[in-house]
Image: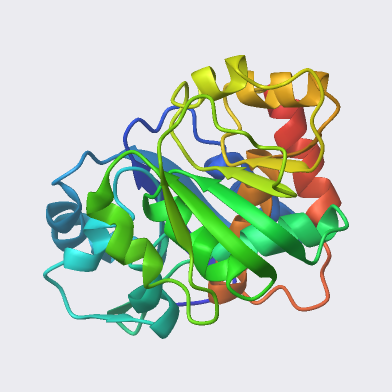
């Protein structure tokens, strides 16, 4: 794989809304890389077939819903790093000398997005949802939060998200649309579009703390809009997309001292206007 000629793609379903192609193509241009990057529809249950039939065409692949957990079951020679094993969620596959390796940059992207907004520690955090992105968030929060609660819809995912923590012992809450959010200084919404709408409808007139909503389209989500209207601070999923994408690029074409955050952010924001 040459750092000057790359072929990548984002896989998932639905995929037509993805801004990953814009992000990676813009980065290629800024870094002087001869690269191709596309969005390809791959539904649940289709990832293994896609990699076996089409994988030779790519140097790296980004994974989004619903493939972050399915990637763990790929029937191909693949090295999953310690982070991916711990959080049981993968968003990046990289091919070197014909062999695939796998990791997740969601957690590092999440932390860098918060750092860019001026935050480096939280006392009490609530994660909404317990899927693949929630586990990546949990793994990152283990390093810079004092306590974490996870509000889940099903107990089935609880053991997997509990295993993401090595320092913190998280607590689980059953889903409650009328939950009191006043005691949390960070709320992270990892649920699909619309899933937290009733939580938004039941927000008090005044809130404090930070809401990190991992969604970016449609934006703002109802929860983000209501949170902002009530005086809370917001970090959008566009920031997560930005920094996890930069971390993916660093795995295949080390960026070094090239700081391209602002140019990429501008391109992404313009795409949503």
Residue at left offset 43%, top offset 27%? 16
Residue 193 lies, with reference to residue 147, above or below; the image says above
Q: Is residue 89 visible?
A: no
Q: In the image, is 202 to the left or to the right of 261?
A: left
> In which quadrant of the rendered view does residue 80 lie?
bottom left
- Image label count: 0
Residue 150 lies, with reference to residue 195, above or below; the image says below
Residue at left offset 74%, top offset 61%? 122
- Where residue 15 sits: x, y (%)? 39, 33
The quadrant of the rendering that contains the C terminus is top right
Residue at left offset 82%, top offset 24%? 206
Q: Residue furthest top?
A: 201
Task: Report the front residue among 102 and 9.
Answer: 102
Q: Is residue 180 visible?
A: yes
- Where residue 231 sits: x, y (%)? 86, 27
Residue 118 lies, with reference to residue 264, above or below; the image says below
Residue at left offset 47%, top offset 51%? 150
Task: Report the front residue among 72 and 164.
Answer: 164
Q: In the image, is 66 to the left or to the right of 218?
A: left
The quadrant of the rendering that contains the N terminus is bottom left
Q: Coloring scheme of the render?
A: rainbow
- Where residue 136 sits: x, y (%)? 48, 62
> In which quadrant of the rendered view does residue 246 lie?
bottom right
Q: In the image, is 134 to the left or to the right of 43?
A: right
> In which quadrant of the rendered view does residue 217 lie?
top right
- Where residue 244 sits: x, y (%)? 60, 58
């Amino acid at each position: 794989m040459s750092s000057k000629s790359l072929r990548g793609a984002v896989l998932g379903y639905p995929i037509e809304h993805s801004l990953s192609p814009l992000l990676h193509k813009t980065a290629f241009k800024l870094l002087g890389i001869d690269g191709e990057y596309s969005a390809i529809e791959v539904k649940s249950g289709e990832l293994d077939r896609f990699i076996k039939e089409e994988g030779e065409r790519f140097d790296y692949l980004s994974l989004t819903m619903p493939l972050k957990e399915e990637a763990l079951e790929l029937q191909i020679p693949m090295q999953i790093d310690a982070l991916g094993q711990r959080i049981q969620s993968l968003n990046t596959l990289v091919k070197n000398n014909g062999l695939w390796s796998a990791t997740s940059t969601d957690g590092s992207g999440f932390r860098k997005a918060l750092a860019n907004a001026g935050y480096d520690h939280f006392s009490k955090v609530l994660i909404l949802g317990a899927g693949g992105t929630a586990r990546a968030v949990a793994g990152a929060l283990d390093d810079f939060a004092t306590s974490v609660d996870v509000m889940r819809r099903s107990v089935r995912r609880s053991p997997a998200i509990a295993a993401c923590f090595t320092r913190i012992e998280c607590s689980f809450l059953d889903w409650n649309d009328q939950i009191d959010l006043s005691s949390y200084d960070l709320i992270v919404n990892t649920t699909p579009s619309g899933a937290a709408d009733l939580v938004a409808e039941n927000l008090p007139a005044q809130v404090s703390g930070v809401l990190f909503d991992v969604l970016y389209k449609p934006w703002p989500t109802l929860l983000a809009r209501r949170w902002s209207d009530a005086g809370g601070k917001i970090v959008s999923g566009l920031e997560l997309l930005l920094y996890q994408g930069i971390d993916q690029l660093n795995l295949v074409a080390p960026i070094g001292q090239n700081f391209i955050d602002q140019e990429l952010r501008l391109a992404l924001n313009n795409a949503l206007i």
